[in-house]
Amino acid sequence: MGMAILLVAIGLAVVFDVTNGFHDSANSVAALVATRAATPGQALVVATAGNFAGPLVMGTAVADTVGGVVTVAPHETLPAIGAALTAAIGWNLATWRFGLPSSSSHALIGGLVGAALAAGGTAGVRWGGIAHGTPDGVLGVLAGLAISPVLGVLVGAAGMAVAGRLLKRARREFNVVVRRGEWLTASALAFSHGSNDAQKTMGVVTLLLLTSGHLSTFSVPIWVRLMAAASLTVGTAFGGWRIVRTIGSGVYRMAPLDGLVSQGGSAAVILAGAALGAPVSTTHVVASSVVGVGMAQRAHHVHWSVVREIGAAWLITLPISAAMGAAAFLLWREFI
């Protein structure tokens, strides 16, 4: 594997992380802006700080999971990962252009599976199974991506029901306290996004280094962690404000307490995923928690047409990005 081609692939990983930052990171502060607890500039500071700290503080369990999805021959690993990143970047840019809260996680996993299938057929993918009561391989990844939005709805609805009961007689002035609390939950959500999403880039870069002989074991180097954290932070600084509008008010028009509960519940689900090694989708966890909060109060005020659009994106991202990954692999193999 030529050093130049390896550097190109690592560069694509950085670009993917940047697009992930401006595509997904805004979700972590959408409620903060929508409920007027902070200005967009203030929210941007919260998002960038949290997204930089998360990858450095948390472990690398998600990176280990992502790195174990592809089992193609070593000489096919570079074009497979390069193709997957190309597909994921393309999908991120397309959905960002239209303000659609699609998932960077789905796009990357779909791209990896599609490229691996093109490289080695079904044997090129570690489909996984149930090991010690826990799903692994692609099955484990899909389980996390499927279960996390359900948990988002449940946590959002339950949290709102409890908060609504406890604060039933609170005066309107209490919103000042709630808005301050939103800063804490938004910080936790930004931290959780960084802790989970940056690890996906860590996983593919570490796999590249392993198969190219630059590492002897699958262990994420500190410079890879710093690179992933920095590139995600740069992307966050650009900000995906198109998607903020969809999450912050398109799904359900939130009051300060709604934002507090949604952010706190989403952070809990995403951090649990990072700890367990499950690459969850921040976009869909946040959107589903907003739906849960809305359903706990006034279900008819939830904008179900927007929810259906998000759900449709959830369903089509994996197969489309897989097809894009397979096509991109054929091009990569042709030119290297």
Image: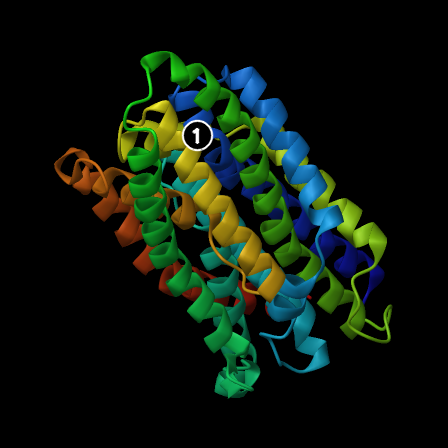
Q: Residue 175: x and y, percent?
A: 39, 18
Q: Residue furthest left?
A: 300
Q: How many marks?
A: 1
Residue 223 position (above or below residue 166): below
Residue 62 position (above or below residue 94): below
Q: Is residue 208 left or right of residue 221?
A: left
- For label 1, the residue is 30
Q: Quadrant of the C terminus?
A: bottom right
Residue 245 position (above or below residue 82): above
Q: Quadrant of the N terminus?
A: bottom right
Q: Nearer the viewer, residue 154 or 12?
A: 154
Q: Residue 267: x and y, percent?
A: 51, 45
Q: Nearer the viewer, residue 296 or 315?
A: 296
Q: Is residue 18 left or right of residue 228?
A: left
Residue 118 in view in this figure: no
Q: Residue 64: x and y, percent?
A: 67, 69
Residue 185 in view in this figure: yes
The quadrant holding residue 208 is: bottom right
Q: Residue furthest top?
A: 173
- Tell me which amino acid carries mark 1: Ala
Q: Residue 216: x and y, percent?
A: 86, 75
Q: Is residue 295 left or right of residue 300?
A: right
- Which element carries disc 1, helix, strand or loop? helix
In percent of the image, x 37 and y 28: which residue is there? 257
In percent of the image, x 66 and y 52: which residue is there? 13
Q: Nearer the viewer, residue 106 or 29?
A: 29
In percent of the image, x 76 and y 46: which residue is there? 227
The quadrant holding residue 136 is: bottom right
